[in-house]
Image (cartoon, rainbow, N blue to C red):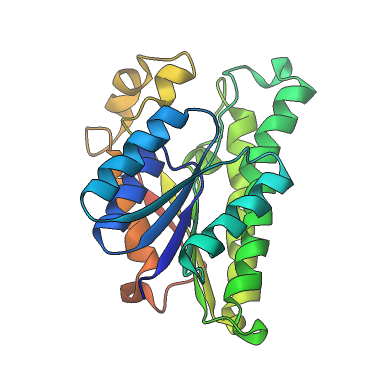
């Protein structure tokens, strides 16, 4: 039986790269998407045409009921969960911190902190050896913004990713004795459409000079780090937050 992976926010960008890489390695992959059904179905169709097992699931990650439904759908389609990748996230609009509204902050924290917390809870119920599970791996997709701070653009986003890093460390220490490894990747400047969707289409070009390696990274490079941390090759790695950032 193939290992089973659930990727939240898997229809585009880094999430889609993770889904493609996991399917190519033989995982049965379920992934969530929020609203672009056509994009999700196109990705799933490409993977299925290549012989992969894949399941797109519509879910609003700010809603606990949708998170529960995504796990239930994965259970029904593929059986016991092996790997959870918490990739779904939102930057919120760019704004100085004195212009961030409570509504913006609520949304960012709900998607970037509350949702992965609830997803880890659900994964633990399925994976924990003391509950009859076979163990497993969880990989959170954080951001270098957690350490850089996001000043002038995304302090709200950076703060949420700092919380995700803390969640990674705490969950790793609590779940390690129960057979579950928990790690995070921390992408830096990555060439995806996130920047354009946030209204900053020139952001990658503008910030590339500040990357010691002299270039932005790719979604595929982040996906490779995620797949490594999920794999048996990382069997003694837990509680790590791995920068994928060209030393930025």
Residue 80 shows up from this direction:
yes
* Picture residue at 35% right of the left edge, 14% below the top: 202
Residue 246 shows up from this direction:
no
Q: Is residue 74 left or right of residue 213?
A: right
Image vertical order of residue 25 relative to residue 194, above or below: below
- Find residue 192 and report its horizontal and vertical position in percent: 34, 29
- Find residue 30 and report its horizontal and vertical position in percent: 45, 53
Image vertical order of residue 156 relative to residue 114, above or below: above
* Picture residue at 61% right of the left edge, 59% below the top: 72
Assign the C terminus to one quadrant of the image: top left
* Picture residue at 62% right of the left edge, 61% below the top: 120
Q: Is residue 13 left or right of residue 199?
A: left
Q: Is residue 148 left or right of residue 126?
A: left
Number of labelled discs? Answer: 0
- Find residue 238 and report its horizontal and vertical position in percent: 48, 71
Image vertical order of residue 217 relative to residue 104, above or below: below
- Find residue 208 and report its horizontal and vertical position in percent: 29, 26
């Amino acid at each position: 039986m193939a290992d089973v992976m659930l990727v939240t926010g898997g229809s585009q960008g880094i999430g889609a790269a993770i889904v493609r890489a996991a399917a190519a390695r033989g995982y049965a992959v379920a992934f969530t998407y929020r609203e672009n059904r056509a994009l999700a179905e196109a990705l799933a169709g490409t993977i299925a045409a290549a012989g992969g097992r894949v399941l797109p699931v519509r879910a609003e990650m700010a809603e606990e009921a949708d998170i529960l439904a995504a796990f239930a759908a994965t259970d029904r389609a593929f059986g016991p969960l092996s790997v959870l990748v918490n990739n779904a996230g939102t930057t919120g609009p760019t704004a100085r911190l004195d212009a961030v509204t409570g509504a913006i902050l609520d949304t960012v924290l709900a998607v970037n902190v509350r949702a992965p917390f609830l997803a880890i809870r659900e994964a633990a119920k399925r994976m924990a050896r003391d509950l009859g599970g076979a163990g497993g791996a969880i990989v959170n997709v954080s951001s270098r913004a957690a350490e850089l701070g996001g000043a002038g653009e995304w302090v709200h986003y950076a703060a949420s990713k700092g919380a995700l890093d803390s969640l990674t460390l705490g969950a790793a220490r609590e779940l390690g004795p129960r057979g579950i490894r928990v790690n995070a990747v921390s992408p830096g400047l990555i060439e995806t459409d996130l920047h354009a969707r946030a209204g900053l289409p020139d952001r990658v070009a503008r910030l590339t000079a500040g990357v010691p390696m002299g270039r932005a990274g790719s979604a595929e490079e982040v996906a490779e780090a995620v797949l490594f941390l999920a794999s048996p090759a990382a069997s003694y790695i837990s509680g790590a937050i791995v920068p994928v950032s060209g030393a930025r």
